[in-house]
Image (cartoon, rainbow, N blue to C red):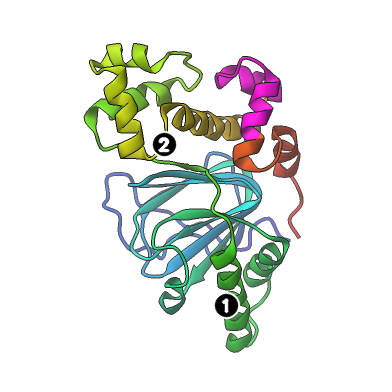
Amino acid sequence: MPETRRTVQPVATPAEPAKPSAQTPRGAAWVPHGYHLDAHSHTHGQLVYAAAGAFSTTTERGTWIAPANRVTWTPPGFDHSHRFHGRTGVRLLDVPVDLCGELAAHPAVFEVSPLLREALLALTDRPRFRPGADRRLLTVVVDELAEAPEPSLHLPEPRDDRLRAVTALLHADPGRPATLASLGRTVGASERTLSRLFHTDLGMSFHRWRTVLRVHHALVHLADGRSVTDTAMECGWSNPSSFIEAFTGIVGQTPGRYQAELGGDVP
């Protein structure tokens, strides 16, 4: 495949409001590490798949991160941005509005089955055939996604100001070993109150939220070429074994396997 199938066009600056955009790349492209697409939205649905590398998608509902065995789904009208981690072989596929109702009404990340992967590659890598043929293959993609598991790679962001203060501290230093009680003393809220807010505002425990945050950062560190041991230490695990266990439980593959697949050739 050529280095770039579609030109990545300029995007809106952060000062501009998010708007329906025809400026995001279409089809297949190699995107450099750290490339960022600013907030925008679409009148159609969109699937983004990293055939190699990884990327994150951020909306008002939080951040999803997608390594090479995941695909992100953004319904029509949702403002979202993307950041790419490692050299990423990205595939973008528009989903017509009349098919969007078959998928989740909110942004999500789904596991990629072998059939789904091949269909995504075919739709984004080949010349356009008869419209009916592409439509039938796209219907297969939608059917596969409707049955695909939705893994726990979503990091929700809080609305409550006290919880925002706590999560800001953790975002700034994911490896911070602080307890919820000590974080509460820093922001002026009790441990009991914060524990309740994590469940009611974010739908998960403090421990679970911090683990997902650390895995998000670990995915980025590994994409940047850091070792598994260094990544474990920097992201807050006391030893590589506990990191590997937590990472595998959330991502679905070991850190070493994930890192080995980052630079893989894309068919």
Can residue 21 be found in the magenta stretch? no
Report whether residue 86 is seen. Answer: no
The amino acid pointed to by label 1 is: Thr
Which residue shows up at 31% across the image and 30% down it? Answer: 196
Point out residue 17 in the picture as x, y percentages from the top left corner: 26, 52
- Label 1's element? helix
Asked whether residue 88 appears in the rendered view, the answer is yes
Q: What residue would you read off at disc 1?
A: 139
Answer whether labels 2 and 1 touch (C-beta < 8 Å).
no
Q: Which residue is mark 2?
A: 204
Q: From mark 2 to mark 1, how far is it between C-alphas?
A: 34 Å
Image quadrant occupied by the N terminus = bottom right
Nearer-the-camera pick, 206 or 69? 206
**Mark 2: which secondary structure?**
loop
Q: Residue 144's image quarter? A: bottom right
Q: Residues within 10 Å of mark 2 (few under 14, many from 20)?
A: some
Can you give x and y, in whole percent of width and height, for residue 141 in the image?
A: 60, 70
Q: Quadrant of residue 121?
A: bottom right
Position of residue 82 relative to residue 6, above or below, is: above
Residue at 76 percent across and 51 percent down: it is: 265
Q: Which mark is residue 193?
A: none
Q: Which residues are magenta?
A: 227-247
Relative side of 215 to 126, left or right: left
Callout 2 amino acid? Met
Which sits earlier in the primary sequence, circle 2 or circle 1?
1
